[in-house]
Image: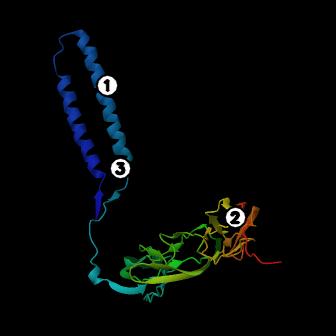
């Protein structure tokens, strides 16, 4: 809607002001003067009025400028139900083709409103779903035709995209953390899960964790999901066996020596135990009355990768036994 304000109204206002001022001048001109000093003030006021009248006359002589149009925005809504509807899917190219006839066979120029470009094209993307009112104009330079259409971009859901995860190799005892990088073309909220043995995307390995693991990362937007796998290799870090319960031993001749150390292995490896002579690998030695002496006993635990050696002192004290007559016979 356009409101046209005409400057002729201003001219009319000036004419009314002129008449009003003239009347004031006449009124003041015929008032009796009580003091001579008042005559000077009256002449000053008359001069001021004449100056204002001169400005009005100049305006009238020069004429008024041409009419100006002041545009007032339209407060109207477009009835979408009457518009031609064009449907596309997200990530498709919108390419409008026009068929325009001009009876004068004039050259026609076209224009399209956003989101289309000047050629009437728009490469939609995921996330652009919605309804768009597009204005198309065709002009021959003198007259312009306009048509509004409703462009409907339909949502096309696609699964989240997981960035490829490289295979990893760590050592036993280390902690592995996985932080998948996931994007969703539709900008949907995505839930990411990682398969075991990772918990909350992390895993603190121990000395029994050696092996190969296929880790599966799953990303879901609630409708569609995608998966990415990688191989996690945990290399063995051998922990040598541990032995406890070994102390120096002191016994007397004729007693039995027993060496039974407690052997543990954090890797759960099979451990072989060997004990040096005179005790032996079974850890048992029945001493005799000739066994007195001091012995260095070596105990070795072997898991096939590392050996742990401990040495204890075995003291066998002499026990004097009286002679024993075994046989008496004639010579």
**Residue displayed at 51% across by 83% down:** 227
Name the residue furthest right.
Answer: 331
User: Are the two marked residues, 2 and 1, in contact with CB atoms closer than 8 angstroms?
Assistant: no
Residue that badge 2 annotates? 253
Q: What's the mark number on residue 47?
A: 1
Q: Nearer the viewer, residue 311 or 94?
A: 311
Residue 107 can be seen in this image:
no
Q: Residue furthest front?
A: 330
**Along the viewing direction, whichever of 167 and 46 lies nearer the viewer:** 167
Residue beneath disc 3:
64
Crowd band around label 1 with a 10 angstrom C-alpha radius: few (<14), some (14–19), many (20+): few
325 in relation to 50, above or below: below
Considering only order in the chain, which callout, 3 or 1, is on the residue closer to the N terminus?
A: 1
In-front residue for pair 52/61: 52
Q: CA distance from mark 2 to mark 1?
A: 152 Å
Please identify the quadrant where the N terminus is shown: bottom left
Q: Could you say where residue 210 lies in the image, as x and y percent from the top left?
A: 62, 76
**How many residues crowd around disc 3 within 10 Å: few (fewer than 14), some, or many (20 or more)?**
few
Tell which circle, 2 or 3, labels the residue nearer the N-terminal end: 3
Q: CA distance from mark 2 to mark 3?
A: 142 Å
Nearer the camera: disc 1 or disc 3? 3
Is 318 placed left or right of 179 in the picture?
Answer: right
Residue 188 — which label? none
Helix or strand or loop: what does disc 1 sit on? helix
Q: Which comes before the other along the chain, label 2 or label 1?
A: 1
For the C terminus, which image quadrant? bottom right
Q: Looking at the image, which residue is at 51% across and 70% down?
A: 201
Q: Residue 310: x and y, percent? A: 71, 64
* Gap between marks 1 and 3 measured at Cα: 26 Å
For residue 275, above or below residue 226: above
């Amino acid at each position: 809607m356009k409101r046209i304000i005409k400057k002729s109204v201003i001219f009319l206002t000036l004419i009314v002001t002129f008449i009003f001022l003239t009347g004031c001048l006449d009124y003041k001109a015929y008032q009796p003067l009580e003091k001579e000093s008042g005559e000077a003030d009256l002449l000053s006021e008359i001069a001021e009025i004449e100056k204002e009248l001169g400005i009005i006359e100049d305006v009238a002589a020069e004429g008024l400028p041409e009419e100006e149009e002041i545009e007032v925005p339209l407060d109207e809504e477009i009835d979408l139900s009457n518009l031609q509807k064009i449907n596309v899917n997200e990530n498709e190219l919108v390419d409008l083709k026009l068929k325009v006839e001009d009876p004068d066979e004039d050259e026609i120029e076209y224009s399209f409103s956003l989101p289309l470009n000047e050629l009437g094209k728009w490469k939609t993307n995921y996330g652009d779903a919605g309804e768009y009112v597009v204005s198309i104009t065709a002009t021959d330079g003198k007259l312009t035709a306009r048509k509004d259409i409703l462009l409907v971009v339909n949502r096309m859901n696609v699964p989240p995209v997981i960035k490829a995860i490289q295979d990893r190799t760590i050592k036993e005892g280390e902690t592995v953390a996985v932080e998948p990088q996931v994007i969703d073309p539709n900008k949907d909220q995505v839930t990411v899960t990682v398969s075991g043995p990772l918990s909350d995307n992390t895993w603190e390995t121990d000395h029994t964790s050696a092996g190969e693991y296929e880790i599966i990362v799953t990303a879901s937007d609630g409708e569609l999901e995608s998966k990415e796998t990688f191989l996690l290799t945990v290399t063995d870090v051998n922990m040598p066996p541990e032995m406890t319960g070994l102390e120096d031993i002191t016994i007397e001749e004729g007693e039995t020596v027993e060496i039974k150390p407690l052997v543990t292995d954090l890797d759960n490896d099979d451990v072989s135990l060997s004990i040096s002579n005179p005790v032996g690998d079974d850890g048992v030695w029945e001493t005799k009355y000739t066994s007195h002496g001091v012995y260095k006993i070596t105990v070795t635990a072997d898991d096939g990768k590392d050996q742990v050696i401990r040495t204890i002192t075995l003291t066998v004290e002499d026990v004097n036994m009286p002679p024993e007559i075994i046989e008496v016979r004639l010579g």
